[in-house]
Image (tube, helix red, strand yellow):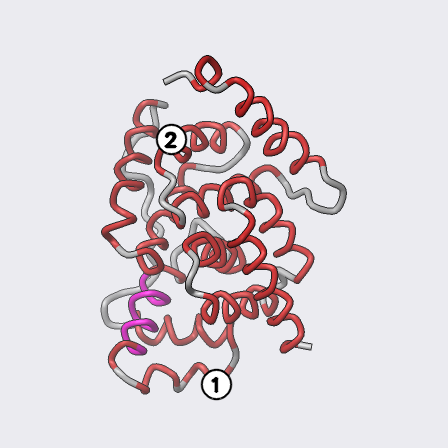
Amino acid sequence: MNFYETDPEFMERFEHFAFQEVVMEEGCNLPDDIRFLAILAVLVGCQGEDAYREMLPVALDHGVSPTSVKEMIYQSVDYVGMGRMWPFLSLTNEILKERGVVLPLEGQCTTTMENRLEKGIEAQAVIFGEHMREAWKAGHINKWLAANCFGDYYTRTGLTLAQREMITFCFLAAQGGAEPQLTSHAKGNINLGNDKDFLIRVVSQCLPYIGYPRSLNAIACINKAAEENS
């Protein structure tokens, strides 16, 4: 459906806000590749499949690499679950193939089944602090978190650790209802150099796609994390 024909007034105001006002607001801008990677991540988080279909080609045209997109999608499985990630993986493959990208892409895995727990614990410690070296012992979910979430995905190449923490923040902010985890990952971002100002820029650029309530909740979590880290 062509919304420019059926809903011209809405489209005029939305496009002005999302593509001009938000992008050009002083102190809110980001490099194109970072901005679009964040936008894609929040669209996965809020399950915006139709919007993702429209935005992925734009993101690719603005410097987001196919590898970065695939790594973002893979990592999302730990934060939205396979049931909500799967359609975006299929959609990404479809669009990449349409653009002539040969799949599968070059592998980015750096761990083995034997060392994934060890490497995942190391990643957790780098992001959140030395106390995380013992966290995996608290129960099987904590062990899975270290080995699967961090050992299987955070250790992959294709995105930096700071970029991985940023997209995790985006997944959590966009889906809502995960404010404790969002605050924790805001701290992780700050520890990796994605400071308060950067995170507020990320939320600002993503606001048109996730709305005001979740954006304001995310900023509250950023402020709390920055205060607790100070």
Q: What type of secondary structure mainly makes up the magenta span?
A: helix
Label count reads 2
Residue at which label 1 appears: 131
Residue 147 at x, y percent in the picture: 30, 71
- Report the residue at 66% width, 36% height from top: 23
The percent coordinates of residue 155 (x first, y second) are 39, 62
**Which residue is rendered at x = 59% and y = 34% of the image?**
18
Disc on res. 53: 2
17 vs 82, left or right, is: right
Image-quadrant location for residue 89 = top left
On the image, the x and y values in percent for residue 178 come to 43, 65
Q: Crowding near pointer 1: few (<14 within 10 Å), some, many (20+)?
A: few
Whole-Å distance between the Cαs marked 1 and 2? 41 Å
Would you place residue 202 above or below residue 90 in this image? Answer: below
Give the residues in magenta.
142-152
Q: Does residue 34 show up magenta in the picture?
A: no
* 149 drawn magenta: yes
Mark 2 residue crowding within 10 angstroms, few (<14) / some (14–19) / many (20+): some
Q: Amino acid at mark 2?
A: Arg
Q: Kindly identify which numbered label has been placed on residue 71.
A: none
Q: Nearer the viewer, mark 1 or mark 2?
A: 2
**N-term-proximal mark, 1 vs 2:** 2
Q: Amino acid at mark 1?
A: His
Mark 2, secondary structure of its residue: helix
Front-lying residue, 217 or 74: 217
Which corner quadrant holds the N terminus?
A: top left
Q: Which residue appears at 46% of the width and 37% of the height? A: 65
Name the foreground residue: 131 vs 88.
88
Residue pictured at 57% horizontal, 42% vertical: 35
Where residue 205 sits, quadrant-wise, is top right
List x then y, in percent, for residue 2.
Answer: 41, 16
* Residue at the top extreme, as displayed: 5
